[in-house]
Amino acid sequence: EESVVRRDRFSGGPARAFLSSLAADKRIFTADLAVDRAHVVMLTEQAIIDETDASEILTALEAIQTAGHSALPDGEDVHEAIETAVVERVGPAGGRMHTARSRNDEVAACLRYRLREDIIETLETVVGARATLLDTASEQTKTVMPGYTHLQPAQPTTVAHWLCSYEEALSRDTERLLGAYERLNRSPLGAAAFAGTPFDIDRKRTAELLGFNGLVENAMDAASARDFLVETTAAMAGLGTTLSGLAEDGILFANKGYLDLADEYASTSSIMPQKKNPDTLELVRGRVGDATAGLDGLLTTLKGLPRAYNRDLQRASHHAFDALDSVTDATAVAVGAISTATWQEQTLETAAGDGFSAATGVADLLAQAGVPFRTAHEIVARAGEQATGDTPDIETLETVTQTVLDSPLTAYVDTGELNHVLDPAGSVASRDSRGGPAPETVTTHLDRAMAVLDEH
Ligand code: ARG
């Protein structure tokens, strides 16, 4: 049995395998059957094909679905192979299935249909991960830790504040995925090759049968557009970038002994028995490369394509699917690793005072006592230098505290208050502006974040 589609013109030569997307089309096999069904139902309702033919085609589609993608006959792609299989079962009347459509609108509909499912799955993973981060944060609102800028100790914060910073970024990644979903959830079906059809089709009906929330109106746009792939891949690259930061921090914190990864999220060395390596987080960091490379590959493929359909488009969709797969897995692993890690509270608290990290707090205190902030900044910088010399990182908090207490600063501020902000926990408690790390502030933030999460 040969393919029913243009068998006289179909390349049987060396380019045959090169042309075919059949293997990769496995991902849209079920989607294509759904699109076929919806199209056949609409054609029947519009009296374009009769009920007998329609019912035989629908029965054949059922059997083809049961037999699975691997049972399909050879073909240039899944659309052609399914049509061949229908004709094999139904006879020539099976060829009526392709009335008033083209593979161009068909493949676009299949991709949108399948991506919708994939994005929903990714959204579930991301929302679940955010819930886990918020839960973990709610247990760590008082766990003081050093906060960094330029990888240098900067100001004390808390583990909860750090966790919430990633949850909020993931919330925006969620919004971007939802935005991509909204725009890809429109039906291109009925555009045919790009120039519509003389048949009296009902595009809104196929859209409704397939659960699309509207149409890609212009037939030429409907057949050509792949910006839905760009948006999806970009959203995944953005999500991956957020996760890579989380992973990098986790790797750094494990390195400094701030956290201990659970065994199931760590690897050992094949030669060095003492090693416990953060390989899962390193792979999360590495996975982002897949998504950003995918985005680049996709944009490069699409750039400069003329209207309407061009076969280059066959090389576009895998980038979106790969990015979805790669980064969705990474989401679960990154958050799994972080949420099951054990935080070393004592080490964190000690480190939180390193590098005169209370300096900003002391300057704030002077400014609150009426000293212009720039002057306060200068005074504290001097005191810090006195205490620590050129290499502030190695000085202990006590030395610095003593220097500050011995200095003329005490003339401006109450010694009790000064001691309070020199203590990392006190410094954190004083930073209670909206979005800050003070435990009650973070607790309020957690309530707000939970409410946003519920909406998503
Ligand atoms: N396999 C093709 C793709 O993925 C389907 C569309 C083929 N259309 C065509 N005019 N050759 O893009």
Image: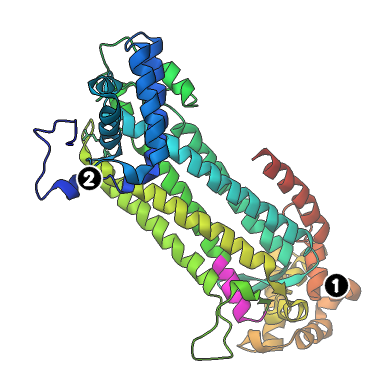
Query: Looking at this view, is 212 or 355 the one in front?
Result: 212
Q: Is residue 248 magenta?
A: yes
Q: Does the beta carbon of the residue at mark 1 sit less than 8 Å from ligand 1?
A: no
Taking the spot 28% from the left edge, 18% from the top edge, the residue there is 100
96 vs 147: above or below? above
Which SS class for mark 1?
helix
Can see residue 42? yes
Taking the spot 57% from the left edge, 45% from the top edge, the residue there is 123
Which quarter of the figure is the N terminus placed in? top left
Tag in front: 1 or 2: 2
Q: Is residue 194 magenta?
A: no
The amino acid on which the numbered mark 2 sits, given as a three-letter code, is Ser
Taking the spot 84% from the left edge, 74% from the top edge, the residue there is 418
Residue 35 figure quarter: top left
Image region (quadrant) for ligand 1: top left
Task: Give, as a single range, the part of the protein colored magenta.
Answer: 247-257
Query: Looking at this view, is 413 or 205 the one in front?
Result: 205
Give the residue number, with chain letter if any, for mark 1. 420
Give the residue number, with chain letter if any, for mark 2. 20
348 vs 213: above or below? below
Q: Sequence-wise, which precedes: disc 1 or disc 2?
A: 2
Q: Find residue 87 and report its horizontal and vertical position in percent.
A: 26, 27
18 vs 153: above or below? above
Which quarter of the figure is the C terminus placed in? top right
Q: CA distance from mark 1 to mark 2?
A: 70 Å
Which disc number belongs to residue 398?
A: none
